[in-house]
Each structure stands twice: as structure tokens, then as C-alpha cells.
Amino acid sequence: MLKRKDKYVVAVVGATGAVGNEMIKVLEERDFPVSGLRLFASERSEGIKLEFGGSEFPVETLNENSFKGIDIALFSAGAERSKIWAPVAAKSGCVVVDNSSQWRMDPEVPLVVPEVNPGDLKKHKGIIANPNCSTIQMVVVLKPIHDAAGIKRVVVTTFQAVSGTGKKAMDELLKQTTDLLNFREIEKNVYPHQIAFNVLPHIDKFMGNGYTKEEMKMVEETKKIMGDNSIAVTATCVRVPVFRGHSESVNIETRKKISPDETRAILSAAPGVVVYDAPGKNIYPLPVYAAGKDESFVGRIREDESIENGINLWVVSDNLKKGAALNAVQIAEKLAGMA
Ligand code: NAP
Ligand code: 3JN
């Protein structure tokens, strides 16, 4: 349990990465009560200093004693590092909010989106898992619909920005784009195919069932967060040449009929959701507008006329913010009793 204090010593593990960088920004932006900040990354980053609140903080490497005196540790250094270091941190008495997939499906570890299942935080034993970005932005929209009409089945197709793969992928999209526009040969290091001016139906590794791991994360995490294993979910995850902001086409079959107007009204009142839906005026959510914002934006709300009780939605959110850093900081705020 996190002891209530006026201010907390916070650690960011993976501080030099795309998510870690965003975590530092979000802590500052939301004025999280920080009495001390410790930043960790790999040996490659030793000596680097990062800014927070007008001061510079050194980046350190991890060791068995790193977490002594730290209250909250926000992890975003990959599943392998979380597997080793999250239990070490928890044993030192620090509460870990882990952004990797390592602990998400562990029955002992709550998987939390504060707008959806804040009550699950009470069950934590030192580690709390932050869901996958594509899951987070979808469940904040699904939850109020499930409460109103009971969701039977979800069919989702994602259009995911390259920042979801990290800093190197953002550099690769930029370089391939400029190389192609200058009639130069491209290099492929991060993705198996060209990402500039292309679309890849492949995120994370392929599993035995023909789905990718990212797709199965969406299926399993959605059920755990919503606390309902009866919701059928199927996903197709696609990488698109966008820097920031994941988009999703979401088809929902409900038990009770719900009209597009009712859906709009329910979602307008939902925490963390903004309805942006006036197609006649070309108003619908777009990644370029969602980038840097906190909410899940929803538009193109319309009936699925092919089934009895169906709704189609288009959901866009900033994958580095609500999809990762912001959700983690919101969890820390809940633990600190701020929200
Ligand atoms: P990234 O830009 O590649 O950054 C990786 C970070 O991990 C860097 O700070 C890196 O440090 C650090 N790191 C690597 N090896 C380390 C080690 N041995 N010890 C300590 N730190 C180490 O990747 P990212 O996009 O920020 O993603 C990082 C992780 O966050 C992912 O692997 C994933 O688990 C999680 N993530 C979650 C979501 C989500 O959906 N919630 C989205 C994206 C990522 P150096 O700079 O020194 O190499
Ligand atoms: O690709 C995206 O848009 C999201 C990527 C998330 C990610 C990337 C590398 C490793 C994860 C994750 O959060 O599931 C992981 C991982 O921890 O398995």
C-alpha cells in the first residue's frame, strides 16, 4: 500500500524512452506532488541528464538497492526489465505501476484504467499493471456502453502510430519518408517492411492461432479490465505511417438495443471521453488533433444495420499519453488519494 504523504519520491524506469519521456512531462503537467525524482535507463544512457520542474536529473542504471526510499516507480523499460526489477522494487516497499505486458494477465496483479475499474487498485500487492495503449482507449468508451446496454461482442481494427514501437520507429518513419521523397534507397531496421507510405497488418509477434500478440493483448486485457469474460472480442492490429495517435474502428454488438443518439448521450457524460461527431461538417476524431490531449475521442457513431443490436464507432487517442504515461500517472494519483 502507498503511505499517504504530502509529496512522493517517484522513479521513472525507462526514462529516456518515448513513454518514459512522456511520463516525466505528464508528472510535471499534472503537478504531481514530487519530493524527489529518480530516473533510470540502460547503461547506454549513463551520464545523460533530463529536465523536470526546471532542474536537471541524472539518468542512473538499476541495481538491487535502487528502489530504497522510492514511493512510486513508473516502469516503461520493456517486459524483460519489468520481470526482473518490478518485484525488486515492490520488495523495497515501493508501489510499481508497470507499463509492460509482463504482469498484465497475472491474477494477483490489478490491470487498471482509472475511468473503468479504479476499485481493482485496492487488491494490489505492490505491482499494478497499465494496459496496452490500444486497449486503454477502447475500454474507456466500451465501459459506459456496457453499463447501459450489455456488450456481447466487439470487433476492432486498429490503425496504430509508430510511436507505439518507441523512439527508433519514429526515427525510421521520418528517415524513410525523407529518403523516398529524395529518391534515395530506404533502410529497414525496426519493421520487416517499409513503413513510410505503407500499412502493415502486423504488430508484435505472430502467435500459433494466426493472431498477433498485440491482437491477443486487446482480447484478453479487455475482458480483465471490464471484469466480464463473456464479452467476445476479436482484433486486427495495423501499423500506419502516423507519428502519434492510435485510431480504432470499433464494432459493438449489445444485448439491449441502443440508438446512435443514446450512445452519443451516454458517451458525452463518460469520464475521459470526448464525443466529436458531426460528419456533415467533416468533424470526426483524427490523430493529428488527439496528439497531446488526454481523452479518447469518439465519432462516426452510427448503427450497424447488418445486425439487430449493433453500433459502429471511430475512436482516437494519444497512445503515448492516455495509452501509456497519463494512465500510469492517473493510477499514481488514485493511489495518492488525489483523484
Ligand atoms: P523506447 O523508446 O525504445 O525506450 C525504451 C526505454 O527502456 C529506454 O529508456 C531504455 O533506455 C530503457 N531500457 C532498455 N534496456 C534497459 C535496461 N536494461 N535497464 C533499464 N532501462 C532499459 O520504448 P518505449 O516506446 O518508451 O517503450 C518502452 C516500454 O514501455 C515497452 O517495451 C513496453 O513494455 C511499454 N510500452 C507500453 C505501451 C502501452 O501500450 N501501455 C506503449 C508503448 C510501450 P536507453 O535509452 O538507455 O536504451
Ligand atoms: O505497438 C504499439 O502501438 C503499442 C506497443 C506496446 C508494446 C511495445 C513493446 C513491448 C508493449 C505493450 O505495451 O504491450 C510491449 C510489451 O510490454 O509487451
Image (cartoon, rainbow, N blue to C red):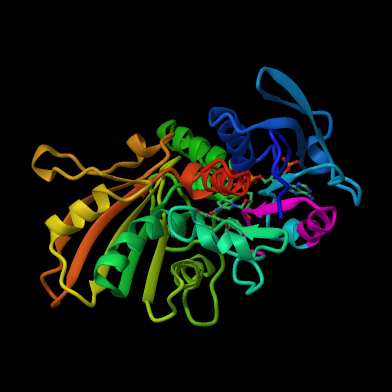
Seen in the image, is 92 located left or right of residue 240?
right
Does 314 appear above or below 47? below
Image x and y of residue 304, in percent: 15, 68
Tell me the quarter of the image containing the N terminus.
Answer: bottom right
Residue 285, compared with residue 26, is above or below; it is: below
Q: Nearer the viewer, residue 75 or 282?
A: 75
Q: Residue furthest top?
A: 54
How far across and down, in percent of the image, does residue 278 sit? Answer: 14, 43
* Res 164 visible: yes
Q: In the drawing, does residue 331 fall left or right of residue 3?
A: left
**Displayed quadrant of residue 205:** bottom right
* Res 180 quadrant in image: top left
Instruction: Please report the residue visible at 79 percent of the width from the left and 61 percent of the height from the top.
Output: 87
Residue 97 or residue 161, whichever sits in front: 97
Which residues lie in the magenta part?
Answer: 84-102
User: For residue 93: magenta?
Assistant: yes
Check if residue 235 falls in the magenta segment: no
Is 158 left, or right, of 40 in this rendering?
left
Q: Is residue 19 left or right of residue 44?
A: left
Could you say where residue 234 lies in the image, as x and y percent from the top left?
38, 74
Q: Which residue sits at x=68%, y=55%?
A: 78
